[in-house]
Image (cartoon, rainbow, N blue to C red):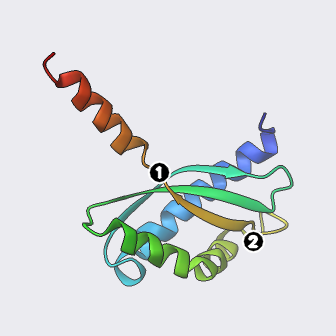
Amino acid sequence: MESVRQSKVSKLLQKELAEIFRSNAKTMFDGAFITVTVVRISSDLSSAKVYVSIMANTDVDKVYESINDQKAHIRKLLGNLIGKQVRVVPELSFFIDDSYDYAERINKLFDKPI
């Protein structure tokens, strides 16, 4: 069960990370459209799992690799944005959110004739 504080910090991280990805898409991520779908933060607020959806790009793995390579820089940008609101900027772990692709596969299965 997520506490109120965890929920607030998760929403803050999601909002600010989305802004970082939006504003730096051309320079850092080859113009990829990156959406932050879910942020799950640990109970001590020291680490966060960030689920991203990568669209409008043919090479998703390359963009994902780029995100992981620049993890320290992204955390620094995040610290500049939320440094006054949290005591410690959490350690970030990025994961690809494939729930949209999964839903598409399920819909295609339903659309198949029997």
Which is more N-terminal, label 2 or label 1? Answer: 2
In this rendering, is residue 87 above or below 72? above
Residue shown at 43% from the left, 42% from the top? 99
Q: Quadrant of the C terminus?
A: top left
| Residue type, mark 2 in image | Gly
Q: Which type of secondary structure does the marked residue at label 2 adopt?
A: loop
Q: Residues within 10 Å of mark 1 (few under 14, many from 20)?
A: some
Residue 109, image quadrant: top left
Measure how far apart labels 1 and 2 are at the Cα level. Answer: 27 Å
Residue 112, image quadrant: top left
**Side (left or right) of 83 relative to 94:** right
Residues 113 and 45: in front is 113
Q: Which type of secondary structure does the marked residue at label 1 adopt?
A: loop
Residue shown at 35% from the left, 35% from the top? 103
Residue 57, image quadrant: bottom left
Query: In the rendered image, which residue does mark 2 sit on?
Result: 83
In this rendering, is residue 84 above or below 112? below
Query: In the rendered image, which residue does mark 1 sit on?
Result: 97
Residue 37 % position (x, y): 50, 49
Residues 92 and 12: in front is 92
Residue shown at 26% from the left, 62% from the top? 56
